[in-house]
Amino acid sequence: MILPSNYEYIVIGDVHGCVDELKSLLAKQGFKTNHENLLQITPKNQYKSIVLLGDFIDKASDEKLTQTIEFIYNNYKHLNQDRKRFYLIEGNHEAMVYRYITKDPTLIITPKTIRDKERYYNTVALLEKNSKLKKLFLELYRECSVWYKYIYQEYFSVTLTHAPCPERYLAKDDIVSQKKMIKCVSRSRNPNVSLDELLPYTHKEAKDNQHYHIFGHLSQPNIRQYKNKICIDTSAIYGGYLSCAIIKKDIISFDSTPFEFKQKKAKQSYNLLFNF
């Protein structure tokens, strides 16, 4: 999906129920909320658009997950009334929660998948007991795309996906490519392997040009960039930061806001990317 090049884009990393931090980060970019929790369109932000890079659910408290889904849903409807201003990219958590709550026949229920649901996908239990919230999530899920691409000029472009993947899969619509852009090799199954060994293509395919690939998925203590590969998941739910990349014409800049401790942070040990 090609993004119109005449707008500025605020690309936000993995939210994971950090709704307060999401509001704070958007406020820093000129989008303030009103008394109805709706982001206000003003002359200063009317040419800006928002892209969530996937994984806006799971790991947070039920209260914050509820607020996050409602906030995204209401503002997705609100901001996209006259033109598209709010874009959603599918992350592996949205994909798995969708499979659980729709009882996907390809998802074989075993003791392990039950444990995984409780440990990694706590949104499932919330949606199973809240039919209204489940409906909102399903509507949002169906609006998600697997990738977006911004092309400013021949020499400058930015491809957006949730997870890093080999270049041969980027911006492709076949089933294999979509899966690769949503989730890469599991870190939890390879705890003693460095990310640079586990995902060698992230640095081996990196180039000194302005055709960037921005992704999240790999929680990091700070924004990690090597040449044209950029990870902006800065571990908000783990007590870190919620970060964004700002694309304006042929310039990429970054901003972030710290975890606000309005809920209990999750636990995570970092495995650094581009740790040369």
Image (tube, helix red, strand yellow):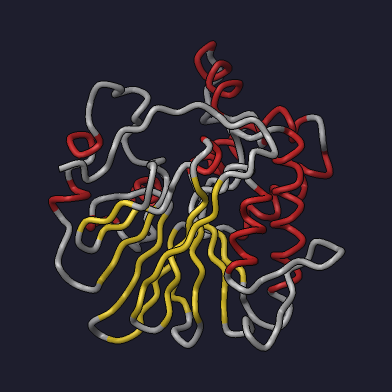
How many numbered circles does the render carry? Answer: 0
Q: Nearer the viewer, residue 216 or 167?
A: 216
Residue at the (55%, 39%) spot, across then down: 237
Across and down, in percent, residue 49 comes to 57, 74
Residue ID at (70%, 40%): 65
Image quadrant containing the N terminus = bottom left
Question: Can you name the residue that lies furthest to the top here?
Answer: 111
Q: Residue 261 appears at what percent x and percent y?
A: 64, 38
The residue lying toward the viewer, choosing from 68 and 111, is 68
Identify the residue at image location x=17%, y=50%.
Answer: 203
Tell me if residue 261 comes above or below residue 181 in the rendering. Answer: above
Quarter of the view holding residue 188: top left
* Above/below status of 234 relative to 59: below
Q: Quadrant of residue 139?
A: bottom right
Residue 276 located left or right of residue 129? left
View extreme (right): residue: 35
